[in-house]
Image (tube, rainbow, N blue to C red):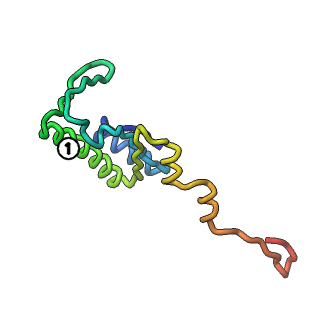
Amino acid sequence: FIISDFYEINEETSNHLLRISRHNDLVAVQIVDPLELEAPPAGRYGVTDGKQTGMLNTRSKKAQASYNDFFSQHHLAVSDLMKKRGIPLIQISTIDNPAMVLQQHFGTARQRISTQPSVTSHTDARSNKTV
């Protein structure tokens, strides 16, 4: 698994992912904040990355549309890149239970076992051995 929000992904990292996926089973897990899915209600919001501070202004419809477009384009670009590289992509929200999302995607161990072909033994009449 590679777990990221993929905001710093570029051609170089894309090529690294391709090389990794050639020799390994790779699944990309994109962490998504609910605020990325839709602009917050109209208003002004103080934001920080821990080092710098800024102001997010969503008072106008244009600002809200720009906000939504930015995140939609990012998610689409990540999805397109993973498809191009043949890497499965799972999105997990920061409010989701990651174990539940992965279980829904991959199924439980019991489900995987029950879908595998069953192996039965029988006795070979010539050698009288169980095979």
Quadrant for the C terminus, please: bottom right
* Quadrant of res 34: top left
Q: Taking 128 as reference, is 46 left or right? A: left
User: Label 1 sits on what residue type?
Assistant: Asp
User: Residue lying farthest bottom?
Assistant: 125
* 114 versus 40 height, above or below: below
Residue 122 % position (x, y): 79, 75
> What residue sits 21% from the left and 28% below the top?
56
Residue 89 % position (x, y): 40, 50
> What residue sits 24% from the left and 26% below the top?
45
* 49 versus 23 height, above or below: above
Q: Secondary structure at mark 1?
A: helix
Q: Which residue is mark 1?
A: 69
> Which of the two residues, 98 or 40, is positioned nearer the viewer here?
40
Q: Taking 58 as reference, is 28 left or right? A: right
Residue 2 % position (x, y): 44, 41
